[in-house]
Image (cartoon, rainbow, N blue to C red):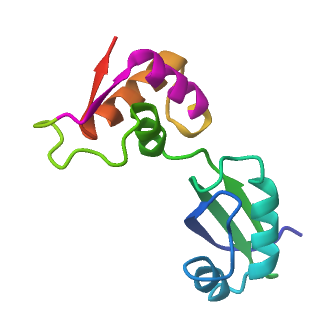
């Protein structure tokens, strides 16, 4: 008999730095998920990722208090800011530009995020990332 799915929880946790303190602990605890078991599993799975980068994680939890989780790639905005060597996006995107990224950088980010994007090929993924860059106040150059 299959386990009964109770719900799904989405969090953004720094790679290799999950701990029982807020926001992770309370979010898991109120759903009956073993906090330390999750933290150990998450930290082991993200041990080789760049430290401090917030990674989206989707946690499915079941009636028997067990859980499964999927770690996704870093958000496009984080990867674009790193490529542009900036700390934050523009205050007024569309009216001001804070930096530039090349289409090659967008293609590289798109290929890295391909499994999380709704794109059929690398060119479509690059266009999605370029659109995100423009909405953050970055200029996309060829």
Q: Do we see residue 42 in this rendering? A: yes
Q: Position of residue 40 (x, y in %)?
A: 81, 69
Q: Position of residue 102 (x, y in %)?
A: 38, 19
Left or right position of 92 against 56? left
Indicate whether 32 appears above or below 59.
below
Q: Residue at x 41, y 36 (%)?
A: 85
Q: Residue at x 66, y 47 (%)?
A: 50
Residue 110 forms part of the magenta stretch: yes
Left or right position of 136 against 21? left
Q: Residue at x 69, y 76 (%)?
A: 19
Indicate whether 81 appears above or below 68.
above
- State the extent of the magenta-drawn residues as a range: 97-113
Q: Position of residue 56 (x, y in %)?
A: 57, 56
Left or right position of 54 against 39? left
Count the marks: 0
| 111 or 48: nearer the viewer | 48
- Residue projecting furthest to the top: 142
């Amino acid at each position: 008999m299959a386990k009964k799915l109770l719900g799904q929880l989405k969090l953004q946790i720094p790679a290799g730095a999950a701990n029982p303190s807020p926001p992770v602990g309370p979010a898991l605890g109120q759903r009956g998920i073993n906090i330390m078991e999750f933290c150990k599993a998450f930290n082991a799975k993200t041990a080789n990722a760049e430290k401090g980068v917030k990674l989206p994680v989707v946690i499915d939890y079941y009636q028997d208090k067990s859980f499964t989780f999927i770690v996704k790639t870093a958000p496009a905005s984080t990867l674009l800011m790193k490529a542009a060597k900036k700390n934050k996006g523009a205050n007024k995107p569309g009216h001001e530009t804070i930096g530039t990224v090349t289409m090659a950088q967008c293609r590289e980010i798109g290929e890295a995020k391909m499994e999380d994007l709704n794109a059929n090929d690398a060119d479509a993924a690059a266009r999605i990332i370029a659109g995100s860059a423009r909405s953050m106040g970055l200029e996309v150059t060829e």
